[in-house]
Image (cartoon, rainbow, N blue to C red):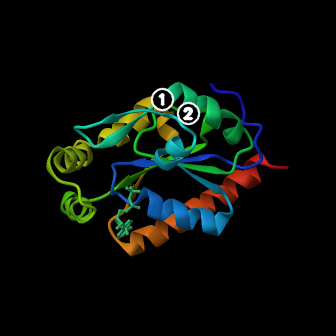
Amino acid sequence: MSPAPVRTKPNIMITGTPGTGKSTLCKELAERTGFQWLEVSKLATDWDCVSGFDEEYQSNILNEDKLLDTMEPIMASGGKIVDYHGCEFFPERWFDIVFVTRTDNTILYDRLHERGYTGTKLTENVECEIFQTLLEEAKSSYDEEIVHEIPSNTLADKESNLDRIESWIESWTENNVR
Ligand SMILES: Nc1ncnc2c1ncn2[C@@H]1O[C@H](COP(=O)(O)OP(=O)(O)O)[C@@H](O)[C@H]1O
């Protein structure tokens, strides 16, 4: 059992395959709640936590140790929404809940194609969603009870996800803050 959190606001992990709508959701969630959105793939560059570039996947390789050291004091106060297409290397104790955005394969293919993804990068990402790699990663890295799949196909899905997460924050606050 991890120790009870001392933070007065929860930390939320939003993970999922690229293109499943993490940033879109996080941006609006941050606006609604006042929580801070940490878009890890962008912040890693700002914080100089990139150790190389993967040519095959056309994406940055993170310096995970440096990134975690940088994030540790930021996470301590709570009220953070962490957005990344991976979650296993973050400490379990950082998060009170984990949401995994899920998108139907054909919709995801179109979104990634529109984003300019081609070749391996496109097919590997769609396969990642088909094999629910990020969901399995979240379930094996965190208590399964705090891991929730959320559909992310339509704008109506986004609205209901925002409502759901906002209600969860309210009940977390009632239960944990006196
Ligand atoms: N719930 C949704 N319904 C319809 N389109 C969405 C939804 N969420 C995201 N999108 C669109 O899908 C694309 C990828 O979304 P984005 O938030 O950048 O994904 P990610 O951060 O997971 O890579 C964007 O064009 C965005 O407008």
Determine the residue positioned at 24% across, 66% down.
114
Marks 1 and 2, how far apart in space? 6 Å
Query: Is label 2's Cβ within 8 Å of ligand 1?
Result: no
Ligand 1 picture quarter: bottom left
User: Where does the image place residue 164, in percent across and percent down from the top left?
Assistant: 54, 63
Residue 91 in view (yes/no): no
Between residues 110 and 158, which one lies in front from this camera angle?
A: 110
Q: Amino acid at mark 1?
A: Asn
| Helix, strand or loop status at disc 2 | helix
**Residue lying at 48% horizontally and 63% vertically, measured from the top left:** 25
User: In what quadrant of the picture does the N terminus appear?
Assistant: top right
- In the rendered image, residue 50, in percent from the top left (x then y), is placed at 46, 35
- Apparent side of residue 139 relative to residue 71 in the rendered image (left or right): left
Picture layout, residue 88 above or below residue 35:
above
Q: Between residues 12 and 39, which one lies in front from this camera angle?
A: 39
Residue 98 at x, y percent in the picture: 51, 45
- In this picture, residue 85 sits left or right of residue 67: left
Q: Going 59% across and 40% down the picture, which residue do you hit?
A: 95
Q: Are marks 1 and 2 in contact (CB under 8 Å)?
A: yes
Q: Is residue 29 above or below residue 176?
A: below
Residue of label 1: 63
Can you give x and y, in whole percent of width and height, for residue 163 in the image?
Answer: 55, 68
Q: In the picture provided, is 156 more to the left or to the right than 2?
A: left
Q: Quadrant of residue 20?
A: bottom left
Say which residue label 2 marks. 67
Q: Amino acid at mark 2?
A: Leu
* Tally of numbered discs: 2
In front: 86, or 117? 117
Kind of element beneath mark 1: loop
